[in-house]
Image (spheres, coloured by chain):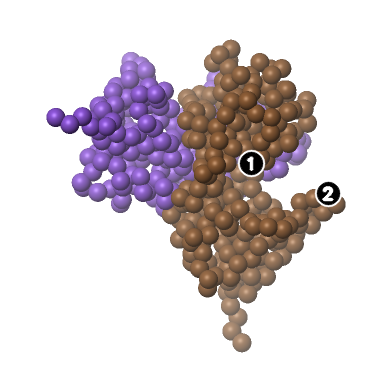
Chain colours: A purple, B brown
Amino acid sequence: MTVRQPGRLYGIGVGPGDPELLTLKGLRLLRAATVVAYPAPEQGDSFARTIVAAWLDRAQREIAIRFPMRPGVPSEHIYDNAARVIAAELEAGDDVALLCQGDPLFYGSFSGILMRLAGRFAIEIVPGVSSLTACPAAAAMPLVTRDEVLSVIPATLAEPDLASCLAAAEAAAITKLGRHITKVKRVLAELGRLAGAVCVEHASLPDQRVRPLTEIDEAPYFSLVLVGKTRANR
Amino acid sequence: MTVRQPGRLYGIGVGPGDPELLTLKGLRLLRAATVVAYPAPEQGDSFARTIVAAWLDRAQREIAIRFPMRPGVPSEHIYDNAARVIAAELEAGDDVALLCQGDPLFYGSFSGILMRLAGRFAIEIVPGVSSLTACPAAAAMPLVTRDEVLSVIPATLAEPDLASCLAAAEAAAITKLGRHITKVKRVLAELGRLAGAVCVEHASLPDQRVRPLTEIDEAPYFSLVLVGKTRANR
C-alpha cells in the first residue's frame, strides 16, 4: 500500500455574494480541489456554496460543514468537529478547498479551523472581498481616507460597550446588525451620529439595498452600517 | 454631428499586488473599457497598472494620472486636475476604468475622484481585496473573530494620537507604516503590545515578508502591522 502525502487546505474567500466578486486565484484553486467544503446552517443551503455554484464540477466531492448555532451547542464543539472532518480528508491525501463567505479571516469561521489545523497540515489562505469594502462600494460612500481611523464594531456588543466604542470612533462600520438594530440606532442617536448613518443590506446581490439607518427598523444579520465622520470630528 | 451619451466611470479595485487577486468582475470591466486610467507617481510606473498589465489590450487607450505628492503641491489641486482629465474622457462618450490598488474606497485615491464626479456621471465601484484582508492571509493570523472590535489606524498620526488610539484598541491594523516605524514601535512597546505585533510587507507579491515587528527597523510605505488582542484584553 502506498502512503499518500497529506492534502493541502485552501481557505478561500469567495466574496460578499456576487459570484463575479470571486478572485481569479480563488476560482483556480476551488476548481482544482478534489474536495470542496463549506459552512452551512443546520438545515438548508450554504451561502458560500451558492456564490460559486456555477463553477463546481460534479466530479468534486462536496462536504457541507454544519454549524448548528443554537443554545446548548458550544461553538468549541462545532469547530472541533469541523476540523476533524477536514483533517480526515487531508490525511487521506486530498486537497480541500474550504469556501468562506467574504474573507476567511475577517470575522470568518475559518479562524476556528486554522487554529485547530495549523502546524499539522499545509494551509494557504486566499483573501477575498469582504463586506467592509463591498458595502462602501454599494453606497458609493468613501469610508476612510487619508489619516482617518476606522473602527469595525460588532453590533452584538453590550450597549455600554457599543456606546463607548462609537463615542471614541472617527469613522465606523458596524457589523452583524440583525436584531441589534434598535440598540444601534439608540446609541447612534444619543451620540448625535444617527443622521449620517447608512445601512447596506445584501451588498453586491440583486436585492442589495442602501438606505439611511433612520428609515429602517429591521435588517438582516449580514448587513453593515456605515458611520461617516461627524463634522465635529472632521 | 451626433451627440454621444457620456461614458461610465468604473472604479476598480485590483487587489494588493498578486494579479490573481483581481476579481472576475474587475477583469471583465477593465477589458471592456475604452480608456484605462490609473494613478501613477510623478515619474515611473503605476503599481495598479503593473498588477493588471497582462490583461491590457493595445487597442485600449491608457491614461496615467500623475500624483506629484511632494511639498508645495496641494492635494486638492492634484485631485481637481485628475477629475478634469477623467471628466473629459467621459464627456467624449468613452467608458473609463480607473484602476485602484487594493480597494477603491479603503484609503484609496478614488474617494477624491468620486467626490468630484458623483452626480455628473454614472459611476460604478467594484470592490477589491484590500491590504486589510491580504495581510492577515499572508501571516495566517486571524485578526478579528466573534465580537471583537478592530481598529484600523494610520501610522501617520501624531504620536499622542497614535498612542491613545492603540491604547483603546482591541485588535488593530496599522497602515502606512514606512518611515513611521520607529514611532509605532515605541508606542506599542510603551503599551506592552510590541511583542505580538507582526509586520507584513508586499502582501501577496513574490517578495512578501512576514516578520515580528521587533525584528525590523525599516519597512516600505505599503506595509501593515497586525496587532492581535493582548492576553489582558482577551
Report whether residue A206 is seen: no
Residue A102: horizontal and vertical position, in percent?
44, 40
Residue A85: horizontal and vertical position, in percent?
26, 26
Q: Residues within 10 Å of mark 2 (few under 14, many from 20)?
A: few
Q: Which residue was labeled with disc 1?
A: B222
**Which kind of residue does numbered mark 2 sit on?**
Pro
Circle 2 chain: B
Q: Please report the residue visible at 59 percent of the width from the left and 26 percent of the height from the top.
A: B212
Which of the pair A91/B171 is nearer the observer? A91
Seen in the image, is A59 located left or right of residue B232?
left
Q: Residue furthest front?
A: A2
**Which kind of residue does numbered mark 1 sit on?**
Phe
How far apart marks 1 and 2 lie (CA) works out to 20 Å
| Quadrant of the frame with the C terminus of chain B | top right
Snapshot quadrant of residue B152:
top right
Q: Residues within 10 Å of mark 1 (few under 14, many from 20)?
A: some
Q: Which residue was labeled with disc 2?
A: B71
Circle 1 chain: B
